[in-house]
């Protein structure tokens, strides 16, 4: 194992540090020495990535956000996929496939939909969502493309939300297609029925169903024509969302990624990754953007 030594130059004057470095380099021993500068005020600090992102966003007119489950975790909505996700506990093919629902709507309502309704009835937008709504009010952000079905972007105030997977905020009658807000559905009878007698289903996309083609077309168009794409709370590994950052990048957009941990996008196409939850990053980003807009 390589010898490891850390030299702390915190309390040494810069000139002396430079002298030491020159000696170390001249003796070619830099390969086994990690040299770290710790100045109270470093002479060459890296710019804060949030400040850099604010520079880009404040001057953008056509920004688009692509969001996934990660943005809603702080609102109390657990993700479906990944570690600890719902699909680890229950098999989506048995409860979230359209054939399973049509075969036995009562079971799917009892096992999945009732639980989702309970969680989503209580969920409120967090600062990740409200930050995107603020960016729309500032005339910077146009469209939010989301993989989520929780309706929290609309609740936060975004007016143009493309929902790849439909919306759980609404139920639709299997017979007459009438829509009713999920929060107004009475669970006294399972499955709940429309006033026409038909069974209600969530207005979101079950496994085995098509992504709405108009959602796909519009999101491809918005991705191809945006200046900045903010990828938030998603590793964008699942199609069709996975394609959008690549469409944006291929058409010259700047990609800002906000995720708690690096994702496959981080090294491949993100121009500027901001590591952290959207609920903590967005307020800081908004503050920095507002400062720039206030001082032309
Ligand atoms: Zn009906």
Image (cartoon, helix red, strand yellow):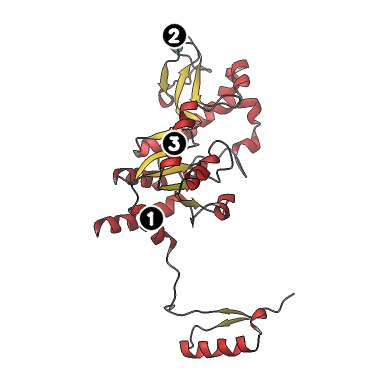
Instruction: Tell me the distance, in whole angstroms, between the alpha carbons under discs 1 and 2.
Output: 52 Å
Secondary structure beneath disc 1? helix
Instruction: Tell me the distance, in whole angstroms, between the alpha carbons under discs 3 and 1.
Output: 21 Å
- Residue at the (46%, 27%) spot, across then down: 214
Q: Given this view, does label 2 or label 3 mark the residue nearer the observer?
A: 3
Q: Given this view, does label 1 or label 2 mark the residue nearer the observer?
A: 1
User: Residue 129 occupies which quadrant of the picture?
Assistant: top left
- Residue at the (40%, 41%) spot, across then down: 125
Taking the image as drawn, is residue 285 in sight?
yes
Q: Position of residue 113 (x, y in %)?
A: 53, 26
Secondary structure beneath disc 2? loop
Looking at the rendered image, the quarter that the C terminus falls into is bottom left
Secondary structure beneath disc 3? helix
Marker count (numbered) = 3
The image quadrant where one finds ligand 1 is top left
Q: Is residue 98 left or right of residue 70?
A: right
**Farthest residue, direction left:** 295
Task: From the image, tell me which residue sits under label 3.
Answer: 221
Q: Position of residue 133 (x, y in %)?
A: 35, 43
Return the mark for residue 65: none
Task: From the image, tell me which residue sits under label 1.
Answer: 56
Label 2 beta carbon less than 8 Å to ligand 1: yes
Q: Position of residue 130 (x, y in %)?
A: 36, 44
Does the CB distance between marks 1 and 2 fall below 8 Å? no
Label 3 beta carbon less than 8 Å to ligand 1: no
- Residue at the (66%, 84%) spot, across then down: 29
Crowding near the residue tagged with mark 3, few <14, some 14–19, many ≥20 C-alpha atoms within 10 Å: some
Taking the image as drawn, is residue 13 in sight?
no
Return the mark for residue 196: 2
Looking at the rendered image, the quarter that the N terminus falls into is bottom right
Marked residue nearer the N-terminal end (2 or 3): 2
């Amino acid at each position: 194992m390589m010898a490891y030594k850390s030299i702390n130059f915190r309390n040494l004057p810069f000139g002396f540090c430079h002298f030491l470095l020159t000696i170390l380099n001249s003796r070619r021993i830099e390969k086994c020495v990690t040299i770290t500068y710790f100045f109270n005020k470093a002479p060459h600090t890296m710019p804060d990535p949030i400040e850099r992102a604010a520079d880009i966003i404040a001057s953008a007119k056509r920004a688009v956000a692509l969001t996934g489950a990660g943005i809603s975790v702080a609102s109390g909505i657990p993700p479906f996929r990944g570690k600890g996700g719902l699909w680890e506990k229950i098999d989506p093919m048995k409860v979230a496939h359209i054939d399973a629902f049509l075969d036995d709507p009562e079971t799917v309502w009892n096992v999945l939909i009732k639980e989702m309704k309970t969680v989503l009835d209580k969920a409120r937008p967090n600062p990740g969502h409200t930050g995107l709504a603020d960016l729309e009010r500032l005339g910077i952000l146009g469209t939010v493309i989301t993989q989520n079905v929780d309706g929290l972007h609309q609740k936060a105030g975004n007016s143009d939300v493309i929902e790849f997977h439909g919306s759980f905020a609404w139920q639709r009658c299997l017979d007459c297609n009438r829509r009713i807000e999920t929060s107004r559905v009475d669970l006294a009878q399972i499955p709940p029925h429309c006033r026409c007698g038909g069974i209600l289903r969530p207005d979101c996309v079950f496994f085995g169903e098509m992504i709405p083609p108009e959602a796909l077309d519009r999101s491809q168009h918005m991705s191809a024509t945006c200046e900045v794409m903010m990828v938030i709370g998603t590793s964008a590994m699942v199609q069709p969302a996975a394609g959008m950052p690549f469409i944006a990048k291929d058409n010259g957009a700047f990609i800002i990624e906000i995720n708690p941990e690096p994702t496959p996008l981080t090294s491949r196409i993100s121009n500027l990754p901001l590591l952290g939850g959207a609920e903590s990053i967005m307020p800081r980003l908004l503050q920095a953007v507002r400062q720039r807009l206030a001082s032309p």
